[in-house]
Image (tube, helix red, strand yellow):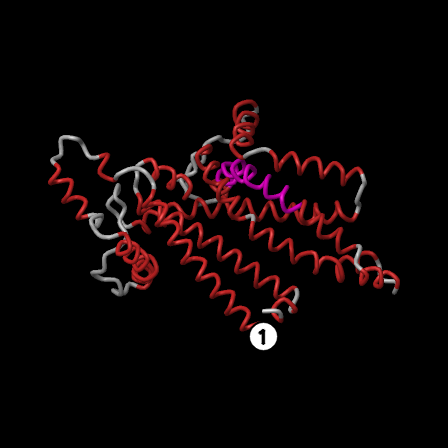
Amino acid sequence: MTQARGLIRSAGRASATLLIFALAIFALMELAPGDPMAQVPMTVPDEVKQEMRRALGLDEPAHMRFGLWLWQLCVIEPLAGLDAVLGTQLSAGQPRILSWQARAPVMQIVASHLPQTLWVVGLAYAVGVAIALPLGICQAWWRHSVFDRAGTALTMLAYSVPPFLSGVVLIAVFSVWLGWLPSIYDTTHEVRGWSDLWVQARQMILPVAVLAVQTTALIARYTRAAVLENLQMDHVRTARSKGLSEAAVLARHVLRQSMIPVVTVIALGLPQVFGGAVVTEQIFLVNGLGHLLISSIEANDLPVVRTVTFLMAVLIVLANLAADVTCRLLDPRIGAHD
């Protein structure tokens, strides 16, 4: 029951965080410079512009527009998604969030861009974590060795290089100089066989590598520090004095406690990966959420900008919620303090 109450509190905090995110995003968009009517030709009469503003709902007070956007985002759009999947009519006749530029539902536009971002970001994060965890553990186990010093130097270098620079360097080396990998991500490519799968894998290597480099560096350094700290604990010394092998000491008494701060870092590092994805998608022309966000900002398409930014916040909050659940599973005492 204690764990259940803790999870309910965590879900409540996540919901409150998302509400604050939504309010902050909407407020920032309202304060941002620019007018949606600025791109309308100057020959259009003012009366027509006023009618266009009224059609877009821009003549309503800010709090009314925020309430409508939040209602559409949290209620109407999920119902529309259920309609698309189940063939129901739950959202029939309800106004949806429309893109000012495309005059189409924003979630339909997002749905066409989201898979590319999830593929690239998800795979990059998985690769980064898979490399960082054993790297950090081995560095801590063989601390002050040549391996540890080399790993520390490489992770510091990798973390210091921004994605836009590492992306350009990788393109110059592997695409221009060696000609091994494509420099542009073909979003229209469809996987229908093994040969298509190989083409898809080749075009994902560079953008995934750019995002995975910094992820690996960050998590490896935290993993090393956490394992080193737990190796000095009294219970670890006691386990060694009882004659347990070093592998058993590491597996039973060190890694479980060490993973608690590391899991938190993995979740907190997700915003940085999404930030890097925005830049990486521009470099490799990946038609994902980052590319959609930049193009919508340039077109002053505020409904798309608001929705995409909020969806990224949702993914980040869900990752932190998953990290909280994982930490409770690793150490049930965490839930007892809620």
Name the outermost residue toward the bottom: 1
Q: Position of residue 2 (x, y in %)?
A: 58, 74
Q: Is residue 286 above or below residue 13?
A: above
Q: Is residue 162 above or below residue 288?
A: above
Identified at 47% across, 66% down, the residue is: 12
Horizontally, is 313 left or right of 205 in the view?
left
Disc 1: CA contacts within 10 A as few (<14), some (14-19) or many (>=20): few
Q: Position of residue 286 (x, y in %)?
A: 43, 38
Q: Position of residue 10 (x, y in %)?
A: 52, 65
Identified at 65% across, 58% down, the residue is: 260
Name the outermost residue toward the top: 177
Q: Position of residue 105 (x, y in %)?
A: 28, 50
The amino acid pointed to by label 1 is: Thr
Identified at 48% across, 36% down, the residue is: 280
Quadrant where the image shows the N terminus:
bottom right
Quadrant where the image shows the C terminus:
bottom right
**Nearer to us in this view, 280 or 41:** 41
Magenta span covers which residues?
198-220
Quarter of the image for residue 50 reads top left
Prevalent SS, magenta region: helix
Q: Which residue is mark 1?
A: 2
Q: Is residue 22 above or below residue 281?
A: below
